[in-house]
Amino acid sequence: MNREEAIALLDKYCSAEASWRDHCLQVGAAARRLAEIISGRGHAVDVERTEVLGLLHDLGRSREHSMRHGIEGYLLAEREGHPDEGRICLVHVLKGRSLDDAVPVGLLEDEERLQLMEDGWRSNHISLEEKIVTVVDTMMSDTQLVPIEHRYASVRRRYGALPHHYEDESLAKRLSEEIAQLLGMTPYDALQELRDDLS
């Protein structure tokens, strides 16, 4: 799948006025930029795929705006014939959690967990491209680039200080540290030059 096909899929399920569409476009652009920097530093990363995954990561918001938008997006992409690209919809909300750990926090129902396991889902393997998109999404408040800590402080103000919000922040920071090693700087710092374009 290329960028144009990803945008076409996004537009099939999203109106041009939906704020989450702009968010997906911004995450795609920022994720691409990080992938370009990582590639420029000699690390193997698929820049085009990273952008595509960024564009599609919130596809499930066309069906659901709760934490379940991850599984909804994955199932939607799978129905459209794009299960590999659709993985990002679930990966970005799991942030490295196992399928078993996703059920108690409401990311999946047990029947969905069992089906994913039967289908061979590997939640313990997250590609570099998926990690980049997950980190960028955690730094993007709608279309504004913010530090991870600010994003989760906002989440806790809006939805309450639930335990899984703290876990999400910890998992996101762990992934961010991995990406920082490849970038030679924090992802937030690497995207500073794009901040005006992203807001």
Image (spheres, rainbow, N blue to C red):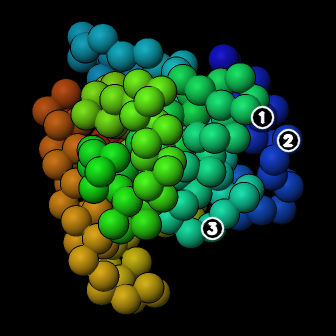
Looking at the rendered structure, the kind of residue marked 1 is Leu
Cα–Cα gap, marks 3 and 2? 17 Å
- Residue closer to the observer: 131 or 70: 70
Q: Residue at x 34, y 46 (%)?
A: 99
| 37 and 71: which is toward the camera | 71
The residue sitting at 81% across, 47% down in the picture is 13
The residue carrying mark 1 is: 9
Position of the N terminus by quadrant:
top right
Q: Amino acid at mark 3?
A: His
**Dot 3 lies on which element?**
loop
Marks 3 and 1, the one that precedes in the sequence: 1
Please state if 40 lies on the left or on the right of 196 as rendered.
left
Locate residue 100 relative to residue 60 in the image: left or right.
left
Q: Which residue is mark 2?
A: 12
Residue at 41% x, 25% y is 120
Q: In the image, what residue type sits under mark 2?
A: Lys
State whether residue 164 is above or below residue 68.
below
- Hey, which quadrant is residue 177 in on the image? top left
Q: Position of residue 119 (x, y in %)?
A: 48, 27
Q: Is residue 42 visible?
A: yes
- Judged from the image, the secondary structure of the residue bearing numbered disc 1 is helix
Which residue is tagged 3?
65
Quadrant for residue 19, please give it.
Answer: bottom right
Contact between labelled residues 2 and 1, with CB atoms less than 8 Å apart:
yes
Q: Residue at x 66, y 63 (%)?
A: 64
- 191 relative to 23, above or below: above
Residue 10 on image: x %, y %: 75, 41
Q: Reply above or below: 109 against 26.
A: below
Identify the secondary structure beneath mark 2: helix
